[in-house]
Amino acid sequence: MAGGFIRLVLAFAGGIALFCGAPAHAQKGVAGTPLRVCVLRDTGGMDPATLIRQPARFDCATAQHRFGPGNYWVISQDIHQRSRSRAPLNVRLASLWQQSLTLHVLYADGKIVSQTTDARGLTPLIQLGAIAEQPLPRSQANVVRLLWHVEGAANLRGILLGARLSTAKESEHANLAMAALYAGFAGLAIALIIYNLALWGALRHRFQLYYCLMVGLLLAYTFSSSGALAWAWPDIANNSRLRINFLLLGGTGTAALVFARSFFEERVFAGWLGRYATGVGLAMAGVGLFYFLTAPFAIKAVDLAFTCSFVALSAAVLPLLWRAWRLRSNYLWLFAFAWGAPILTAALRALANLHLLPWSFWIDNSTILAMMVEAIVSSLAVAYRIKLLRAERDDAIEREVMTRRLADTDPLTGLLNRRAFLHQAIGRAGEQLLLIIDLDHFKRVNETLGHDGGDEVLRVFARMLRTSVPQGTLVARIGGEEFAILTPADRPIEPESVLARLRQMRMPFDIKVTASIGTCQGTLASEVDWKALYRIADTALFDAKSAGRDRVRHAMRAAA
């Protein structure tokens, strides 16, 4: 069993590693040529015209996150390219927490052109993929190098990351590729929400609502973190957009855990594992809300807490897989594949946040891709769960039908028993013809053939009755060897034909079996009617017995 679980974990890891290979469209989101940058702390009163000509003063070796928060100067490597009308140049940067950003461009002719952001920060520069793009002013002279003045950098990941020099055509292609990616996901998410809400309207399973909540929050997070929010709301400050990102990401993680707990069997999340998952879910939502409300105050501590919640979420995977394996969960493989990508990306983001991995555009945006896979696989999981629920329902219905049939059926002959016969007979509309049939000298049959032989005679006789009556006729065994037939008076059964068929029937050991029949016609609107009709038919049956058996006697209810 343990060996099988290890194989499961290895397959799970292999599948996730396969997923994490960056897709072809994804690479276009980081268009352009990387620019190496160096950092210098702003000590106040520093002249950009002097600094841009003194690149040697800048630190190129120390990791940016080690400088801490504050104001900085960042200089690029030498470029020596021209920004022309037919081929304008842009510089693309990662969107980070900062108050303002000023770009100084040094040209080969000694001219310096500056661009400063306003109170919105990077919002006017945001492109799809949450990349800030700064166009370099066109000039007859080559661009020598770039100098940024970063004010109010939180420096959680770095001061200025992901700098790339791109042409306008490369930027356009990047935006188109990212637009296709996000639009495809948005269409998928909306379709999944509509589809599952429609299913919920029919089936009313709670996990369907939790799934829609998870996909809805993911869609909102994608809208914000992709940069589309800055396009739709141009006046929003970029730092406010980042706060919304954290709020929605925490809510998405919590909704995903709630969905998982409602979808998988309760026994998988029983005990400490369920309490742990609840704690992690509350922590993610709480830290996301706290980040939204308090940033930029204590932003570093809140960011660390958020990272720890991602680590805690990743830490729950192996225990969950192990327990699901031991309990033979129906949804083990679905859990492994649906949650593999989000858990791995959560771990990668945590490692990047802790500076154990270098910053990467696709690690920073990995949550969207991973949750896209999770949404698709979870949708398949929902369909599979509904299939199992339908199978359980069908099985329950079949068992109920069988139970009712057994409750209504005489176990020896397969005919209706007395209770079921009365339930269906009383209340029938119109005149009814009742036949009470009793096998003659049945005690002698039992003495001759034994009780097993007598039971076989009863079964043969019941089979003959079942095949002799038209559709809509009630046939029941109402006593030991006593049977009843009820049929509408306008479709009567000839009792003599019943006796004739019985005489021709081959019985066990070729024993000769006959029967006596008493009939009566009347209404069966109530139980009182039944008792009267049965008493008259039973009296007619007694007359048939007294007259020598193997015959029919008719009685009129009015005469009685």
Image (spheres, grey):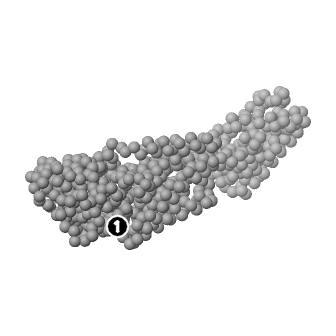
Circle 1 is placed at which residue position?
69
Q: Residues within 10 Å of mark 1 (few under 14, many from 20)?
A: some
Instruction: Give the residue displayed 24% in from the left and 64% down from the top.
Output: 149
> Front-most of 179 and 116?
116
Task: Tell me where residue 9 sits by quadrant.
Answer: top right
Residue 259 visible somewhere in the drawing: no
Residue 507 rendering spot, x and y as whole percentages: 80, 30
Residue 321 visible somewhere in the drawing: yes
Q: Amino acid at mark 1?
A: Pro
Residue furthest out toward the front? 56
In the displayed structure, does residue 323 sit left or right of residue 478?
A: left
Q: In the structure shown, which secondary structural element does the residue marked by tag 1 occupy?
A: loop
Instruction: Give the residue displayed 25% in from the left and 71% down from the top.
Output: 44
> Front-most of 36 and 431?
36
In the displayed structure, does residue 104 sit left or right of residue 429?
A: left
Residue 321 rendering spot, x and y as whole percentages: 57, 49
